[in-house]
Amino acid sequence: MIETERKFLVRSDGFKKEAKSATRIVQGFLNTDPERTVRIRIKGDKGFITVKGKSDAGGMSRYEWEKEIPAGEAEELLLLCEKGIIEKTRYEIPNGKHFFEVDAFAGENTGLIVAEIELFSEQDEFDRPDWLGEEVTGDRRYYNSQLSRNPYSTWDGEE
Amino acid sequence: MIETERKFLVRSDGFKKEAKSATRIVQGFLNTDPERTVRIRIKGDKGFITVKGKSDAGGMSRYEWEKEIPAGEAEELLLLCEKGIIEKTRYEIPNGKHFFEVDAFAGENTGLIVAEIELFSEQDEFDRPDWLGEEVTGDRRYYNSQLSRNPYSTWDGEE
């Protein structure tokens, strides 16, 4: 299916008191080619394999295919992944008929907090909470596949 | 799981009369990196996603993970694959307590016929039928991931 998502930086901890859940995620990539990323993820006690295609020009829509797999198999597959395993905590935050997924990264990406909202179409509207910062939709530096190769802690000061 | 396989060229059509099945296979690769190939396959009316790790030094044993998926999803994922979709007919041929899988390639790999046998260990013995030719276990040119990038029809004459 095609997903429509917008991505924002987060400028305060305000999101935490609105969160209805917080889940630890560990993930790696079998392929970080933007044409066809293949991700292995352990989320809580579940495993997933996810394939994503290239984004459209605006970076909002992207083909995505995902399958749940046993967490033990995901752990085996993580051992095959490229260097740069990503660890983060995901907070789920209701927002009207939508919800935000806020990812607070750990390890080499500590300090980076990113909010994503999945929309029904590219024209879809949503409420912007106080803690929401600059939009970074389509900025490939914030793709998890890129963060695994080029983590936030290594970025230049101008960013 | 770790698989132990040996691979051979096939030097005559003799295998066809021993075959108990012949199935059309179409497959592509989301990743052809030998460290971690990711294959999408349609075999008859079934779909599969398969991840393979690097071979050991002799090329006999290799980590392999496979999941059946709906054929329609496999067709979508084939559209994302790297160039070089592989088409072949697979013949299954009993051989004592083992069996051979003989792949007769089509398209850009027409003319290539390869037999593989899966063994219980690297020391395991098996009968060698008349049609079995030279062993090519561990020769990366015969990996399907490599045949999709560098098909048989483009190989030099000395091969």
Image (spheres, coloured by chain):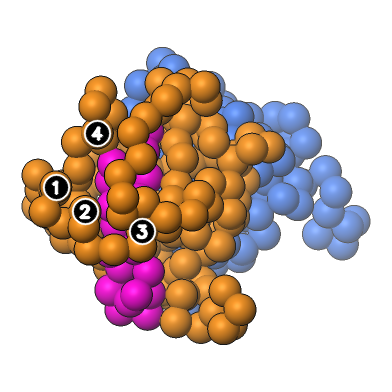
Chain colours: A blue, B orange
Kindly give the residue lying farthest to the right in the view shown.
A157
Q: Chain of mark 2?
A: B
Q: CA distance from mark 2 to mark 4?
A: 11 Å
- Three-letter code for the amino acid on which mark 4 is drawn: Asn
Asked if labels 4 and 1 touch by Cβ distance under 8 angstroms, the answer is no
Q: Earlier in the sequence, mark 3 or mark 2?
A: 3
Chain where mark 4 sits: B
Identify the residue under disc 2: B15
Real-space CA distance between mark 1 and mark 3, rounded to the nearest whole angstrom: 14 Å
Q: Is residue B66 above or below residue A20?
A: below
- Residues under numbered marks 1 and 2 in contact, where contact means CB atoms less than 8 Å apart: yes
Quadrant for residue A13, please give it. Answer: top right
Residue under disc 1 on the same chain as residue under disc 2: yes
State the residue position of label 1.
B18
Left or right: residue B13 versus residue A60 is left
Label 1 and label 4: CA atoms lie apart by 10 Å
C-beta proximity under 8 Å, tags 2 and 4: no
Q: The disc labelled 3 sits on which kind of residue?
A: Val
* Residues at marks 3 and 4, CA–CA distance in whole angstroms: 15 Å
Q: Secondary structure at mark 4?
A: strand
